[in-house]
Image: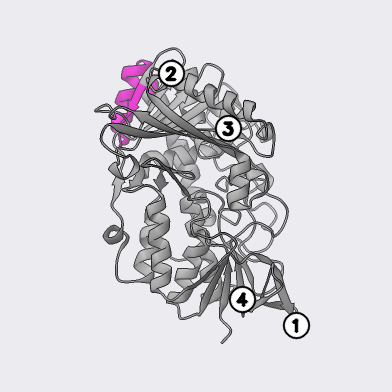
Amino acid sequence: MLGIVVVGAGLGAMAAAARLARAGHRVTVVERSETHGGAVGRWERDGFAFDTGPGLLHFPAVWRDLFVKTGREELGEVLDLRQLDPAVEHRFADGTAVLLPQGAGGVRRALDASLGAGAGERWASLLRRARAAWETTRRPLLEEPLTGRPAPGAFAEDAYPAARRGLLPWGRGADRTLARAAAAELRDPRLAALLTGTVRDWGVDPERAPAGAALLVYAEQTFGSWYPAGGMRALADAVYERCRARGVEFRFGAEAAGIVERSGRAAGVELADGSRVAAEAVVWGAPGVGAPPVGASRFTLLVALRGARPPGTPHRTLVHAADGLTVSVLRPDDPALRPDAGHEAAVLSAQVSAGPGPWADAREVEAFAERLLDAAEAAGLGLRGRVLWHRARTPLDVERETGVPGGVVPAPALAGGGGRFLAAPNTGRLPGTYRAGGLAHPGGGLPHAGMSGAMAAGLITEGPDWRGST
């Protein structure tokens, strides 16, 4: 038996590899870089360590399922996974701050206390409709593979049931964006920013996304945000070790240049050095197949701070700056990320346009880094005076490390917009080819990438008619 080649060692690709190996296939992973993890990287200096990709985990059940299905040790036995509580702090340009606990009841009370009576009910009302969108699209978007082109009308309509004001709904067609829904239904710029800023932190543009993108906020509030001790890189390491335990072979420094075709189906991959790896099926978990991805990127600032982390500091803060920028500030209380108790590591980031933009100019990079620090300072976080040094990462760094053109950070797939917010199908053009990872259905984000690996593996092991687990 020739076995299966998986292209790329990102989290989605490794999720497919582990499942396929557990099913009895001989699996070889070819990866152009010298390490695993894809976008889930790590950068270290002077005893400080930083996650360079996702900083939090949502839907940990996706990864718990992977470990249950691929071996004896469960995820909790190899990873110290902690739920954030409080879940997040929001700071607004007018000086208002709201600390949101884990749990819907506590959120309503916190919003009423900080933003005024009725804020909690307006928020809960919107999330009830977001829950309806979640329940409508959860299975087709997160649990069922996408094969070929979607059927006419599939995923075309936004599943969010808009509230009516007067005789007409607040928006129709292309006007039914998340930003419009937030403004019309929440009726407080700060509450609207809480919604749109959270969705933007998922990599989704609220000015373009359908209102159903609110389901991301519903899911985050319902299922929580989680952090593994040691940083997100610890999750990548755990999945890599599970693959190795299942007998997956990794070839690092091996860049796939294309798929080998024989008799009208995939027969392996050709590497950049001209050699070939024969296979009966290929799972492509890297950029380079199909049209270039469309979307936004992220600018990330890794900050080394002198002085101990102040007691009670929230792990996650979203700063809603006066200039409209949403800045994510992650300050994990994790000894593994700092040289000693007298220092602190922080990661500031914001959504930016993909592509080279101004990022080849060191002055522009430093100016944007200062903009993030200014936003944090205006919000009262008190970081600037403690900065030892900082390291900026731009879309050019994302492109160099992941290979994704323009440094695009894929967003989760969404229903609506005529299907414009879907990722590539899990099946390729050529029989015997499959896709996994953030560029494949159901899109970007660690839970979605993990599901893409499950979908690719399921289609191979169960056949083309497989419609997901029940």
Q: Residue at left 43%, top 18%?
A: 377
Mark 1 nearby-residue class (10 Å; few <14, some 14–19, many ≥20) = few
Q: Quadrant of the N terminus?
A: bottom right
Question: Residue type at mark 3?
Answer: Pro
Is 117 in front, or is 35? Answer: 35
Judge depth for marks 3 and 4 and give the one in front: 4
Q: Earlier in the sequence, mark 1 or mark 3?
A: 3
Kindly report the distance in space between the C-alpha atoms of the residues bearing marks 2 and 3: 25 Å
Q: Earlier in the sequence, mark 4 or mark 1?
A: 1
Circle 4 is placed at which residue position? 281
Residue 48, horizontal then vertical, whole percent: 38, 40
387, above or below 406, in the image: above
Q: At numbered mark 1, what does the secondary structure look like: helix, strand or loop?
A: loop
| Residue 124 located left or right of residue 5 | left
Residue 145 appears in the figure: yes
Residue 184, horizontal then vertical, whole percent: 54, 22
Residue 331, horizontal then vertical, whole percent: 36, 34
Kindly report the distance in space between the C-alpha atoms of the residues bearing marks 2 and 4: 52 Å
Is 203 in front, or is 376? Answer: 376
Residues at circles 2 and 3 in contact by the CB criterion of under 8 Å: no
Kindly report the distance in space between the C-alpha atoms of the residues bearing marks 4 and 1: 13 Å
189, above or below 306, in the image: above
Residues at circles 2 and 1 in contact by the CB criterion of under 8 Å: no
Judge depth for marks 2 and 4 and give the one in front: 2
Circle 1 is placed at which residue position? 263
Can you tell which quarter of the image residue 359 is in? top right
Q: Earlier in the sequence, mark 2 or mark 1?
A: 1
Question: Residue type at mark 1?
Answer: Ser
Is 115 magenta? The answer is yes
Circle 2 is placed at which residue position? 377
